[in-house]
Amino acid sequence: MCDTFIALGSATADGGLVFGKNSDRPADEKQVPISIPSRHHRDGLNLRCTYIEIPQVSETFAVVLSQPTWMWGAEMAANEQGVVIGNEAVWTTAPLGPPALLGMDLVRLGAERGATAKAAVEVITDLLQTHGQGGGCGQNDPGFQYHNSFLIADATEAWVLETADRKWVAERVTDGTRNISNQLSIRRNATLVSEDLTTSSDFAAMFSDGPDARSIRESRGGDLLAADAGHITPDTM
């Protein structure tokens, strides 16, 4: 199980942003840090992600990724604009789709194309609704599939983005701390929503596959962040 944490300026020791994520990929799967420079791309170029091709954009930002070596995407990413993104597996009542974009593909795409946290949210949700999410999420394990939630931040704000198939909700966070841990957590406090939903929709109640120990991890993570609020550092995280 993964956990992703963010502490905004009001909760940190120096007023900066502190982001942290643990990634519990399979033990025998290689995951490496890689750096990719900014690039300009010619018109009409397609981009091959893990399973499908999508249109490439004219310019992509430089990124640092933590990438399982068998896939195109990444578990976590930071770009030259100061945007950071991490994702979590979530299991929902929505149907699993055919091979499409992995959540890890969306992490990388959001970082390569999003100049701000809000822009990265828009990149990910537009791609999700256009191409969908799906496909095996483990190396040589096509049956290991899930939907995704994301914690996306820049120096001024953070966004929690949670999905169930092509439906999604996003919560803006401008102060303090926030964490996610392999479960849907947005109830009636969404800032942005996909079609057919409203900001008063209880997304977690609508799509969660049932309560379990994941809620304990999220609660404990929130308690740990709250205990250090005001003096969180990278070492704290």
Image (cartoon, helix red, strand yellow):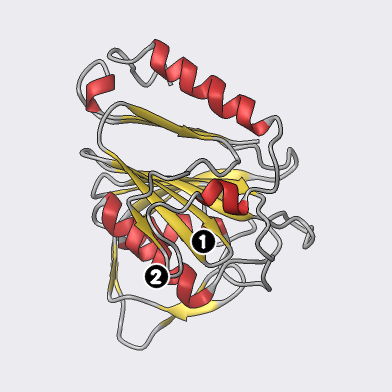
Check the image and report above or below for 95 versus 91.
below
The crowding category of the residue bearing disc 1, from other C-alpha atoms within 10 Å (few below 14, some 14 to 19, many at least 20), is: many
Q: Which residue is mark 1?
A: 105
Residue 61 located left or right of residue 151: left
Real-space CA distance between mark 2 and mark 1, rounded to the nearest whole angstrom:
13 Å
Q: Is residue 27 visible?
A: yes
Placement of the N terminus among the 4 image quadrants: top right
Residue at point 71%, 57% (across, down): 145
Disc 2 residue crowd, few under 14, some 14–19, many 20+, Cα 10 Å: some
Q: Quadrant of the C terminus?
A: top left
Q: Position of residue 22 (x, y in %)?
A: 55, 32
Q: Secondary structure at mark 1?
A: helix
Who is closer to the viewer here, 75 or 224? 224
Write the residue at 48% across / 68% down. 128
Q: Amino acid at mark 2?
A: Asp
Specify whether 51 is left or right of 80.
right
Mark toward the start of the polypeptide (2 vs 1): 1
The structure residue drawn at horizontal position 53% and vertical position 67%, both measured from the top left corner, is: 166
Judged from this view, the residue extending furthest toward the front is 200
Looking at the image, the residue that sits furthest to the bottom is 44
Is the residue 233 above or below the residue 81 in the image?
Answer: above
Callout 1, which amino acid?
Asp
Q: Quadrant of residue 12?
A: top left
Secondary structure, mark 2, is helix
Q: Which mark is residue 29?
A: none
Residue 5 position in % (x across, y down): 44, 31
Q: Residue at x 58, y 47 (%)?
A: 205
Please determine whether, in this image, residue 138 is positioned above or below residue 179: below
Residue 73 seen in render: no
Residue topped by disc 2: 126
Q: Quadrant of residue 37?
A: bottom left
